[in-house]
Every structure is written in structure tokens, then in C-alpha cells.
Image (cartoon, grey):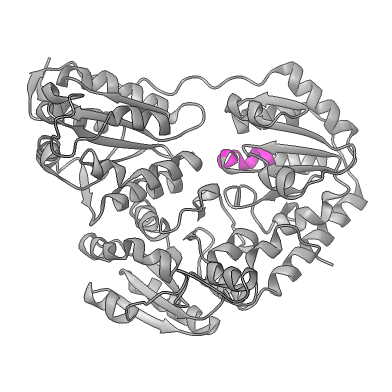
Amino acid sequence: MPRMTGGDAIVDSLLRHGIDTIFGLPGVQMYGLFDAFARNANRLRVLNARHEQTTAYMAMGYAQSTGKPSAFTVVPGPGVMNTMGALTTAWGVNAPVMCITGQVPSAMIGRGRGQLHEMPDQLATLKTLLKFAERIEHPTEAPQVMARAFQAMTSGRPGPVAVEMPWDMFPASADVTPMEPLGKRANPLPDPEKIAALARLVDGAKAPMIWVGGGAVDAGPEILALAEKIGAPVVSFRMGKGVVDSRHPLSLNTLGGFELWDKTDLLIGIGTRLDVPIARWAPAPAGLKIARIDIDPAEHRRQPVDVAITADAADGTRALAAAVARKDDPARRTAIAAAKTAERAAIEKADPQYSFMKAIRDVLPDDGIVVDEVTQLGYIIWYGYPVHQPRRLVSSGFSGTLGYGFPTALGVKVANPDRAVVSVTGDGGFLFGGSDLATAKQFGINLVTVVVNNASYGNVLRDQQRLYEGRHSGAVLHNPDFQDYARAFGVAAWRVETPDGLRGALKEALASEAPAVIEVVSDIAKDYPPYKFHQPRLS
């Protein structure tokens, strides 16, 4: 058994689980861990940020864009609490992220004596939010606790986990037995009887619709094969975009899907909560049957349906495709094509948002990645941005986390250094973490950030004025000069006012292969609220 410190034992486990980059911000409780990082610098890269929230968002972006586990480390108490927005967002978007944090000294845990960074029962707080949270009480426990954390993080529905270690255990030495990864737990196999029941519904349906979400990102080939066999449209919102290439004739966004909704007689959800069609498009068409394929059995309890299949998206879809008869209905194909044409026409009317969005799509290659934000340009991306591959639109999903976009995009770029990555953010959200332009510059993270500057929380301002006789409160912003702000960090900057200006600046910024900021000065929130797309009539 090798002699290791607690920090060494954690690093050994990270390396055995394929982690070669960790995002972190050091502090006194974590010195023993960061010393282990330093001694393993040839095998493990540490990217430190200027705020704890950024370390967690970077890890989330890394995980979302790759599907691989990622890890970050911060001090306990206020440090780990600063990452809660990222951890709850990671839970919502199924990102396999590990938080490694510290604790007060072992002898002081639970005594409430006001130790540095102490908080009441930190572990209990983490357990309420995450898939797994456990304390490593001694260096000898690190290999097993870490292995179980990685297994929980990646098994079934992926999600965030946390481990904590007391301050005095990071530098403490012991004879430690390293442990190889446990591997993911076996996925549940699709129930043959339920597959047969769903196949009967499919065979009897005249107008089936497939809806895909974030749980389907690795099942694109299987979903497309099913869709083509039964002649069904594949509809996606934020998290499911790119599961089927937006250019495919059967691929629709929510606008096109809604055009077909009234005549839909079977809705098949794959890796999705089905919130939009069930909640936002209510009431359902008469006689509608609903089925779901989801690896998380809890989802079936949250939303009862006619047929619920607990299985991995690819496994369940493959089994269903093998069990259904082929459909060839020219009239159905024509209706889907008409819906696709109508959705494009509707999006094009949403100007200037559409034109700015189109400028980004025109410049980015097929495998380029856009990271959205809770901002007007981000909203139209949810509905109308064409995505050609899975994991090429990174979103905060239903969390709607203001300020998440820029720091998350830093992590996406770290994970995808050879791909074009663009952060689309607003002036409000950007300044939640804009100081981490310093991190981009320090580590050569060549992210291009598009900041839409309308000196307000634009949607809030518009809604307040619309709903409250022109009154508003807390929605108007005083901004810095974003050009000077970026250049103060040594980051190149452009200012544009038109879609063509954005198109040109984006080409230049991506070609520079350096961190860059493009400020778009435009009041694009003024005239076209995004919620008009929730229940549209495209005609």
C-alpha cells in the first residue's frame, strides 16, 4: 500500500477516473489538496478562476459539452455556497459534475464553535441538492468514497455529486489502497411487454410525434431511425436540439411542432419532461395517447402517461424501432414539410433578434458551439437556432440561470479547444462573472463572448412597463464601457450595432484565436417578447 496524504489519495482517484483538468480556487482548508495538485502538475491541469461560481460553471460547461465527468474544488462554507447556482443548474441539465470541498478540522465538526468557513451541517445541505454527497473522514477512505461518487455521478440519469474532507485530513498521511473505477451501474433493460404495448400504439397511430430532450443527446441515430420508419416529426426545444440535425425534413422546433399538435394522436417523449406540450400547449388533442422513454423512474411518477418505459434513451428507442411496422404516409410527410416551412417563416418575423441569430449561425461551422443565456438573443436561440449535432447548444434548461452563460462557456471552450465556441449573453448576465475575462486571458481560453447591451434587464423592463402602466423598478442598468472593460484584461473587443456588423466582427474574433468580446448595442428586447413563441399560430 503506498503512503499518501488525503490530497494525494483524491488526486490518485481523479486520475484513475480520467480527470485531467480541474477547476479550482484555493483556500486555507484546501492547502493539502492544492499541494497534491502541484506535485502532479504534469498529469493534472488546474485552472483557477476569480470567483467560486466560475469554477463550478466551468466544470458544468466541460461536462455538458462532452458528456464526460468534470470536477471543481472550492473552500467549504461560503465558498461552496457560492457554487450552489451552478450545482442546481447541473442537476437540472444532467451534468456529471463533482464538487470537492473541505470542512472544519475533524474534532470541531458539528460543534458550532465558529470555525473558519463553518456552516451548520454542510453535508446535509449538499445531500438535499445532489445525487450523492459524502465525507471522506480519513485518507484511507478516499479511494472508495471517490469511486462511489463517480459511479453515482455517471449512472442512470447523470448529475452532480460532492465530497468533503476535514481540513486536517488533506495533509495527513496514511497507507492507502488505491481503487479502480467501479464503472457505471447497468442500465435497466426495456420491458418487452411495455415495448410491445407502445408498438401497438405506434402502429395504430395516424399522426405520431416524437419529442426529445436532454436525456436523448446520445441517442440521435436510434431516434432518427425510429422517426424515419414511422414517418414522425422529431420536435426539440433547448436541451434536445441537435439530437436530430435541424436540417433534416423530420426535425422541427417547437413552432413547427405546435402546427401539428391539434392532429397529433400519439406523443412519444424520449429523455424529456414533456413540459412544453403537456403544460404549455394544454389542452391536449382529444384522444391523445402519451408514452415516455426515460432512464429515471422518478420521471414516470412525476408525470403519469399511458406507457412508461424505464430505459436508456438509445436502448429503449432501438427496441421500439425493431417492434413497429414501417409507415409511409405521403400526406403526413407533406404536413410535416409545411410545418417546417411555417416555423422558419415565423422565426424570420422576429427581428432584429432573428437577424442577429442568423449572423451567428452563418459564421459558425456545423460543430461550433453556442452557449445561451437568459437574454433576448438567447431566447430566440431556444426556438429558432439551427443545431446540426448534439451538444452544440449548451443551455441552463429549465433552471433559467441568469449569469451562468459566460463562465459556463469558458468551461465549454476548455473542453473543446479546437472548436469555435461563442457565449451569447446580455449586459446584465455577463457582469455576474465578467471579471473572469482575467481567467480567459491567463489560460488562453479563446472564447468569443457576444454581449448584447441595452442597459437593462430588457425583458423585465418591457414586462414591467407593459403590465404596470409604464412603471418599472430595478430593471435599468448602468454599464461600464465594455470595450474598455475587455481591454483592461488584455482582451480584444469590438462594438457593433447591426447583424452585418456582428457577422464581420465574429469572423474576425474567431480567426484571432484569442479571447474576445463583441458588444452588440441594440434594444432588441423592445418589440418582440419571446413568450409569443410558447403558443403560436403560425398562420
Quarter of the picture containing the C terminus is: bottom right
Residue 216: within the magenta? yes
Give the quadrant of residue 291. Answer: top right
Residue 452: within the magenta? no
Specify whether residue 229 is in view.
yes
Please tell me which residue lies in front, 472 or 341.
472
Please tell me which residue lies in front, 239 or 361.
239
Q: Measuring from the top left, give residue 528's x and y in whole percent.
A: 65, 73
Give the quadrant of residue 530. Answer: bottom right
Specify whether residue 130 is in view.
no
Q: Measuring from the top left, give residue 264's x and y in whole percent.
A: 85, 45
Chief SS of the magenta region: helix
**Quick check: 489 above or below 253?**
below
**Quick check: 458 above or below 74?**
below
Q: Which residues are magenta?
A: 215-223
Q: Measuring from the top left, give residue 222's x and y in whole percent.
A: 66, 37
Instruction: Please name the residue shown 23% across and 72% down the image.
Output: 489
Q: Is residue 326 left or right of residue 347?
A: right
Give the quadrant of residue 77. Answer: top left
Instruction: Please name the residue shown 39% across and 46% down the image.
Output: 86
